[in-house]
Amino acid sequence: MSEHPATETSASQPAREIAVRASKVSMDFGNGVLAVDNASFELEKGRFLTILGPSGSGKTTLLRMIAGFQEQTSGEITIYGKPVHATPPHRRSIGMVFQKLALFPHMTAAENVAFPLRMRRFNPRSIPGRVEQFLELVKLQGYGNRRINELSGGQQQRVAIARALVFEPDLLLLDEPLAALDVKLREEMQLEFRRIQHELGVTTINVTHDQREALVVSDDVIVMDGGRIQQHARPVDLYREPANPFVAGFLGLSSSVEGTVTDGGELKAGDQLLKGAPVGDIPPGTPALAAIRAEQIRMGATQSALKACDVSLDGLVRDTIFEGERQMYVVEAKTLPGTVFHVYHHDPDSFDLFDVGASVAIGWNRRDMKIFRNSA
Ligand SMILES: Nc1ncnc2c1ncn2[C@@H]1O[C@H](COP(=O)(O)OP(=O)(O)OP(=O)(O)O)[C@@H](O)[C@H]1O
Ligand SMILES: [Mg+2]
């Protein structure tokens, strides 16, 4: 089910250097389910990979195995071609930032950033200049003498990032370092991560359950569920071409309809035929599930207002929710009682276009409704 985003290598392209390679990696804690189940992926040098998934999907376990904190029960992980455990922990060139920052609260910001340099026996004379350079990188110039408990949450986060990067690791591992921050600061820091990673070009693996963060910061994204890699793709491909219903449902807001596939590749739900785009080969008569995103559904007073859509249906507004930058409508299809569609409507001039109970029409383009084999 996983697909690797980087596809062709032609003779004219330089060979890709693989920083991290996981081959059929599993982790069995002995409690009946595999925390990580047969995970394989490659990460090219210099790229930013995010592992995205719900709580308990195995993200931290996978990251801890890459860091060498935990040994997999089967499979192999290599960093620049060497098995993780072939290098003793103190020789591994890995920077890490976790949700709990583990900064030294009684030390200053500068002392915290200097710590890994002293541990690695950098030339003492080179340390102050390097510390200053990395404090500048995270926009904390002038804060070096502050103690950690005299800094804000976001500033502490930056110290932790500087400390993880100051010795120029081959690999940066991040486990939800932004989870504790408020939304606005988190979004700011996501862009900061992106900027710093671009500036230094350090190969990075970031773990999060925040889909927006995954789309914003990453070159590549791995979606995990139940210990398994569900899809490995670039953000835009993940969003536009989800490989299965889990990925379609996990990113963005989707509505789904159950039915069977017809010989024309449409979904038959009750008496209604819905045009969509089958994902993979699905023989006629197979139980299927179609999914469409809220922003891909158009809405109008009648079907004649939706002539540009490949599909249109009559519906009834069941609920309407003001979300600030948009209005969300919940529309029940008249021909599919009990099936509701979530529709985003962006029109700054007319937010409350339709009231609850109003008759409306909804429509979409064929390619936007993905039809998946229904394995549930
Ligand atoms: N040391 C352990 N011993 C036994 N089971 C564990 C251990 N660590 C994790 N697990 C189990 O492995 C599964 C995956 O856990 P993991 O921490 O990797 O999930 P996660 O995706 O990081 O979740 P979250 O988003 O909540 O941090 C869970 O079912 C968890 O209970
Ligand atoms: Mg975790």
Image: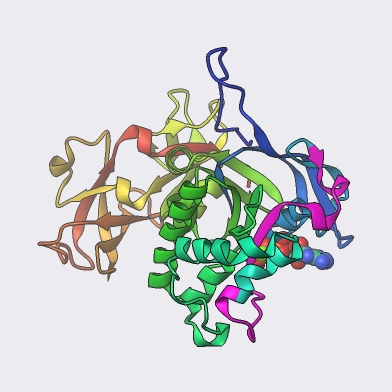
Residue at 53 percent of width and 14 percent of height: 12
Chain part drawn in magenta: 82-110
Along the viewing direction, whichever of 120 and 45 lies nearer the viewer: 120
Q: Left or right? Give the position of 103 relative to 343.
A: right
| Image-quadrant location for residue 322 | bottom left
Could you tell me residue 321's position as x and y percent?
28, 69
Q: Quadrant of ligand 2?
A: bottom right
Residue at 58 percent of width and 69 percent of height: 160
Q: In this picture, is 295 found above or below 185? A: above
Is residue 347 visible in the rendered structure shown here? yes
Could you tell me residue 253's position as x and y percent?
41, 55
Q: In the displayed image of the protein, which residue is found farthest to the front? A: 125
Q: How many marks?
A: 0
Residue at 24 percent of width and 62 percent of height: 326
Q: Left or right? Give the position of 40 relative to 308.
A: right
Q: In the displayed image of the protein, which residue is found farthest to the top? A: 11
Along the viewing direction, whichever of 109 and 308 lies nearer the viewer: 109
Could you tell me residue 127's position as x and y percent?
62, 64
Q: Quadrant of the N terminus?
A: top right
Along the viewing direction, whichever of 12 and 184 lies nearer the viewer: 12
Residue 300 magenta: no
Q: How is the image coloured?
A: rainbow
| Image-quadrant location for residue 58 | bottom right
Q: In this picture, is 349 found above or below 93? A: below
Along the viewing direction, whichever of 9 and 340 lies nearer the viewer: 9
Could you tell me residue 140's position as x and y percent?
45, 71
Q: In the displayed image of the protein, which residue is found farthest to the left? A: 349
Is residue 179 visible in the rendered structure shown here? no
Residue at 62 percent of width and 75 percent of height: 111
